[in-house]
Amino acid sequence: MRIVEGRLFAMFSFDVGYEIDVARLRPAYLDAKEPASNGARKSVPPRVQFSSPAIAIPGGDRPLTILDRSLRAEVTLRAHEFGVVSVVFAVPFDDVECDGLPALTAALTSATTLESEAREVLRARLPELAHAIVRPAPDAVHVVEDYYVLQVSRFDAAIDAATLLGTHRELLARIVHCEPHALSPSETDEVLRTAVTYRPHDLVVTDWNVALVFDEEWEDALDVLELLNVQLLELRFLDAMLDRRIGALYEHVGQPRRLRSFRREVVRVQELSELRLDTATLRERLVNAVKLVGDLYLTKIYARTADRLHLGEWQRSVDGKLELVQKIADVLGDRAATTRAELLELTIILLIVFEIVLYFVG
């Protein structure tokens, strides 16, 4: 089996700050087409709404080397309002033997060559986006999440979705699972659990790092997969950030309470309130970034891939840590209130003593 016409998309999402003010980006960057705008072909009536569509920024062509093959990739940067820039490489993928694809996907997900290329692209273009980034991240080029999509328009033989899921199911599972060696039947079934097909000649199969999209109209699915990659990046970032802050908070709570630390406690409570509000706001914007109403095809792709990426578990982890931050803030608030009361009592005592001293001196 050979791919006659297709593309390889390598997507690298970077957290560059708390928020990107897309309205401040230059008008030339505005993308007139909202993502997933062609959903009408899959269901009736479709309504695919992005709360704030990403802005596509052309990046020109760039030479890449993939498994000793020199290729030219079309580069696109996609800026999302919740502080993420995705670098997308689109590589022509014609006349490729499918038997070699499991080794290719395994090499792509284990090597760092394309990731380094994406970092160079971001470093070069980040200064022109800096004016629109709110609270820039100091390590913007280091926090990254990658995802690869093999898009196939035509095979060399008349192959449909049923054939791929039947005759070629084991090969298909190894491609998206990045496994050069044979898989057991049970593992093959588990990998293909995400398969979504709407018509006889379209199929989407997704896994943790790789997806295969067999469809000539692939733009919608690619937009949804890129958004899922962005959501995973942001949830992982929030989870790690909360871990660091909670560790520091435990050390602070464990310190002996002193009267002179009253102001520090008040400041810390304010910081925790701001942290909780910022994190909860960003999390809600991530979850509500896209609404797939009526489009069952894209909804299935989104839901099954989100389950494969464990987005629900990441969301629950972030929510749990937000609750823990609130409990720590309550403890610090109680400590600050107790310290305030003790300071007031001490002040009253000192005033009484001062009046007594004045009486005897007078």
Image (cartoon, rainbow, N blue to C red):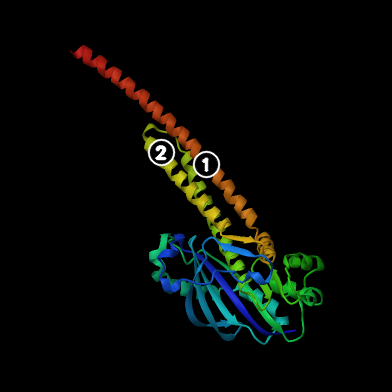
For disc 1, the marked residue is: 326
> Where the C terminus falls, by quadrant?
top left
Left or right? Give the position of 216 relative to 22: right
Q: Residue 152's x, y, as percent? A: 67, 79
Which residue in the rendered view is the most extreme toward the left?
362
Q: Which residue is mark 2?
A: 266
Q: How many marks?
A: 2
Residue 303 shows in this picture: yes
Does 344 appear above or below 212?
above
In this rendered view, identify the residue nearer to me: 324 or 95: 95
Residue 309 located left or right of residue 332:
right
Q: Residue at x 32, y 24 (%)?
A: 347
Q: Amino acid at mark 2?
A: Val
Residue 170, given in percent of the width and then of the height, sits at 78, 73
**Type of amino acid at the residue the image marks with label 1:** Gln
* Residue depicted at x 29% and y 18%: 353
